[in-house]
């Protein structure tokens, strides 16, 4: 079975690629989780973050946006002692800040989903890459998303992180055309 070139032989990586990556996601809690994980990944490997994913869910109250938005300094210090997550104060504080920013967006747009999917006019962009080397690290859409999220107070949302987020939540189908998931994911997009 042919997969995208970036997938290693680690089962957790295969499972993520085969079942989740690139599938359109519209649940605000899951969107918050994936945005958080993409930010946590900055400077690290995605495999490292996938291995810590369950720990993140436990540590951040399963990404309950309201609960995370209300974390205080005591909770930050507790998270800094949690060996199951990336213990980077800036990334932890960014998660709390981002939760508050998502709450503001939910008031303005009704939900985070409606807001975030505007950057691709509400429907996934289907690419047709033949090689990993063709896939961009960022696009004009991720640039626009990054800029707007930054204006709204989000942290760890540079354009490259935003594009990885877009790939993860299916805003773009960046499976290469020879990957068995390419056509499967396209079916979700119809």
Image (cartoon, rainbow, N blue to C red):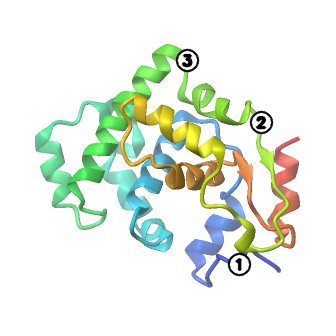
Foreground residue among 150 and 72: 150
Quarter holding the N terminus? bottom right
Residue at left offset 41%, top offset 21%: 104
Q: Secondary structure at mark 1?
A: loop
**Going 40% across and 52% down the picture, which residue do you hit?**
57
Gap in Å between the C-alphas at discs 2 and 3?
17 Å
Instruction: Point out which mark residue 5 bears.
Output: 1
Spatial distance from mark 3 to mark 1, Cα to Cα?
37 Å
Mark 2, Cα crowd under 10 Å, few <14 / some 14-19 / many 20+, is some
Camera-nearest residue between 99 and 120: 120
Name the residue beneath numbered marker 2. Answer: 123
- Which residue is depicted at the point 59% across and 33% down? 116
Disc 2 to disc 3: CB gap under 8 Å: no
Residue 159, position in %: x, y? 52, 49
Give the labeled residue for mark 3.
Answer: 109
Q: Earlier in the sequence, mark 2 or mark 3?
A: 3
Left or right of residue 68, residue 138 in this image:
right
């Amino acid at each position: 079975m042919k997969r995208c070139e970036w997938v290693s032989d680690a089962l957790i990586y295969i499972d993520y690629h085969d079942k989740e990556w690139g599938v359109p996601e519209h649940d605000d809690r899951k969107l918050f989780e994936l945005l958080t994980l993409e930010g946590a990944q900055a400077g690290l490997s995605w495999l490292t973050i996938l291995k810590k994913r369950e720990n993140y869910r436990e540590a951040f109250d399963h990404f309950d946006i309201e609960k995370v938005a209300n974390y205080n300094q005591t909770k930050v210090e507790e998270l800094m002692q949690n060996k199951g997550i990336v213990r980077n104060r800036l990334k932890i504080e960014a998660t709390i800040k981002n939760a508050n920013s998502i709450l503001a967006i939910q008031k303005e747009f009704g939900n985070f989903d409606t807001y975030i999917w505007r950057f691709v006019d509400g429907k996934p962009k289907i690419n047709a890459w033949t090689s990993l080397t063709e896939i961009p690290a960022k696009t004009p859409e991720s640039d626009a998303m990054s800029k707007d999220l930054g204006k709204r107070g989000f942290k760890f949302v540079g354009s490259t992180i935003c594009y990885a987020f877009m790939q993860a939540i299916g805003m773009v189908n960046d499976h290469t055309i020879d990957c068995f998931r390419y056509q499967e994911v396209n079916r979700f997009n119809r």
